[in-house]
Image (tube, rainbow, N blue to C red):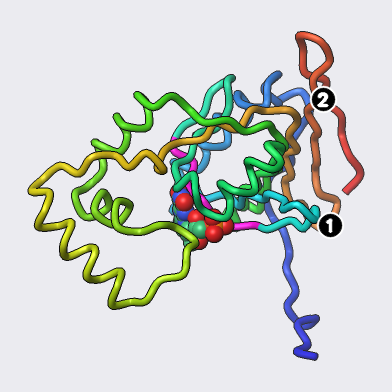
Amino acid sequence: MRDLKSIQLEYHQKPLEQDQLNPTPWGQLSQWFDDLEKEDVSYPNAAVLSTTNNENFPSSRVILVKEFDESGLVFFTDYESRKGQEILLNPQVSLLFFWKELDRQVRIQGKIEKISRKKSEAYFNSRPFGSQVSAYSSYQSKQVSKEELESKVQENSQAFKDQVPCPERWGGYLISFENAEFWQGRPSRLHDRFFYEREGEIWKISRLSP
Ligand SMILES: Cc1cc2nc3c(=O)[nH]c(=O)nc-3n(C[C@H](O)[C@H](O)[C@H](O)COP(=O)(O)O)c2cc1C
């Protein structure tokens, strides 16, 4: 076995205090994005999305969250990809952010649904031509040869001069906040963890043992 036990981490960040928490998970996430803007963090909006297949096997992959508010968090993808197929089977997903520069993690569980066609098209149209051609040419998660992919990209780059139509199979998903946990790494593993869960109209916040 490759021994990784000698990798030792120590956490030096300030504590996360319950009385400083925002009353909603999207508000707290927004506060943490304010902090991220002050740091040099690569891919701050990258998150791990986990879905499950028909045998309840989870699978995870990184996606980029493009926006969020009280209705949930939005990312874009190919609806016919593996994740898209798994979402059809089980629309309950998990999303995880990890920012090593701040020793912070956020876990979210939520229900997922497609956003409107109009919003997906608006975002697709705002993307660079190269990204549009790639999305149009690539049937995400299907087997493909490099030659086939490259020739499709070449063909579509010529067919569409500067605007590619948004493929039907491409668009955004919205993940609602069902619950969320905010984790702040602290010295000697006495990490601060706060769990948000819905209690009627309000969010109940509990401290969890590290
Ligand atoms: C930094 C990073 C950002 C990514 N962003 C996205 C994204 O926003 N949407 C997406 O469909 N795939 C994104 N991917 C690729 C996915 O991780 C994954 O390979 C792809 O979506 C296919 O996953 P699936 O076969 O499980 O559907 C990203 C990968 C990385 C490493």
Quarter of the image for residue 203 reads top right
Image height check: is 110 above or below 164? above
Image height check: is 203 above or below 129? above
**Which range is magenta?**
60-66
Image height check: is 131 above or below 200? below
Q: Which residue is at 29% across, 39% downward? A: 166
Taking the image as shown, residue 75 lies to the left or right of residue 99, namely left
Amino acid on which disc 1 is placed: Arg
Identify the image quadrant of the N terminus: bottom right
Residue 62 painted magenta? yes
Q: Do residues under tags 2 and 1 come within 8 Å of each other at their CB atoms?
A: no
Q: Which residue is at 43% across, 24% downward? A: 116
Mark 2 and mark 1: span between their CA atoms?
21 Å
Residue 115, given in percent of the width and then of the height, sits at 48, 27
Q: Is residue 43 visible?
A: no
Quarter of the image for residue 101 reads bottom right
Q: Which residue is mark 1?
A: 189
Q: Which residue is at 37% across, 32% downward? A: 120
Near mark 2 (Cα within 10 A), the count class, few <14, some 14-19 or many ≥20, is many
Give 200 or 130, whichever is nearer the viewer: 130
Q: Which residue is mark 2?
A: 205
Taking the image as shown, residue 145 lies to the left or right of residue 183, namely left
Q: Residue furthest bottom?
A: 1
Give 2 or 30, whichever is nearer the viewer: 2
State the predominant SS element of the stretch in magenta. strand
Q: Assign a secondary structure to mark 2.
A: strand
- Which mark sits nearer the N-terminus, 2 or 1? 1
Residue 196, given in percent of the width and then of the height, sits at 78, 28
Q: Which residue is at 29% across, 29% downward? A: 122
